[in-house]
Amino acid sequence: MSLYVGFDPGTSSTAIAVVDENCRLIKYFEFPSHKVVKDAPELIRLVKSFKPKAIALPSGFGLPFKSGREITDQDIFLMALDSPKGEGPLRALLKLAWTLENSFTVPGVIELDTVPEFRKYNVIDMGTADKVASAIFYMTLYDSFVLVEMGSAFNAVVVVKDKRIIDGFGGTILPGPGSLGSIDGEVAQLFGPKLNKKVIYSPHVKDRYLELVRIVAEWYSREINAPIIVSGKRKEDFPVGIKHSFPFKEAAVGSAYIANAYGGGRCSYLLDSLRARGTPLDYVIISKL
């Protein structure tokens, strides 16, 4: 029996899902993310124990399919948007990716060919690779939908029409309990060089971030005539939408589905939804304006 592995590198917990060739969930594990840096070698050994045919790596801001054995420091920087020499759960796992046979990176929303180019300019975080994985999971249940992810720190919206991601608003565009979201240009100018990640990853006002996420989700729901699906640790905070209850993190299983598709399993029909190119930085053109 062929097995396929996927990751969900969440803020509070990191999950690993294992599915078979028919995309049936075989094993599921979840660990506190703060332990991943120390325990990364043990998690890698756990993944290897299944002898998977394909492994979808945790990929942060994303990169189009690339073998884990070919990942460079520059690739790690692009996925983490931070020094590859630094510490963190994502970087700890990616630094060991070269030891995983049949592993590969997963694109973020901005790299997907299905997203019109005009929507990509001067943004980076249209949705990280794990948001793509969540959308892939729900594509097995719905053709079109607006996915609202209410994570422990970040909120995001991913728009899917006819099993194609066409737009996205990531956790540093939309505000949340761990993100200021899009910042007024005048505020950014006043902060100057003090506007660092510590500031960006500050909590926003709850009533306001719920309102802004709802405005985006409901507008797109009307625009494409599709339901709003709400997932994530804080999904009950969101006042509208369909809320499924699963004994696993959808992004982890969706990531395993991506591995299954990549490896030629039953989910391979989803590969067209994952066509991608470039890097998370390709559409930053402010200096050219």
Image (cartoon, grey):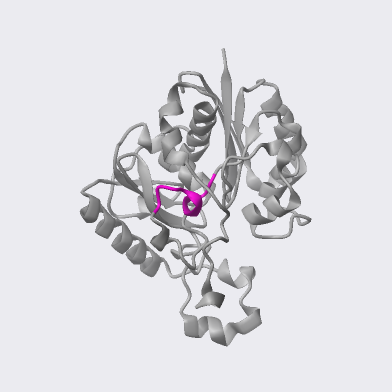
| Residue 274 image position (x, y, % from top left) | 47, 40
Above or below — where is 168 with respect to 2? below
Q: Main secondary structure of the magenta part?
A: loop
Q: Position of residue 236 (x, y in %)?
A: 36, 50
Q: Is residue 96 above or below residue 25?
A: below
Instruction: Give the magenta range.
Output: 107-115
Q: Is residue 62 left or right of residue 184?
A: right
Percent of width and height locating residue 198:
63, 69
Q: Is residue 107 above or below residue 289?
A: above
Do we see residue 118 in this rendering? yes
Q: What residue lies at 24% left-to-right and 50% top-to-bottom?
A: 224
Residue drawn at x 40%, y 47% is 114
Q: In the image shown, does 237 or 164 lie closer to the viewer?
A: 164
Residue at 75 percent across and 44 percent down: it is: 95
When asked about the image quadrant of residue 57, the answer is top right
The N terminus lies in quadrant: top right
Residue 102's quadrant in the figure?
A: top right
Q: Nearer the viewer, residue 162 or 118?
A: 118
At x 43%, y 52%, the residue is: 150
Q: Is residue 113 magenta?
A: yes
The answer to whether residue 158 is seen in the rendering is no
Q: Is residue 139 magenta?
A: no
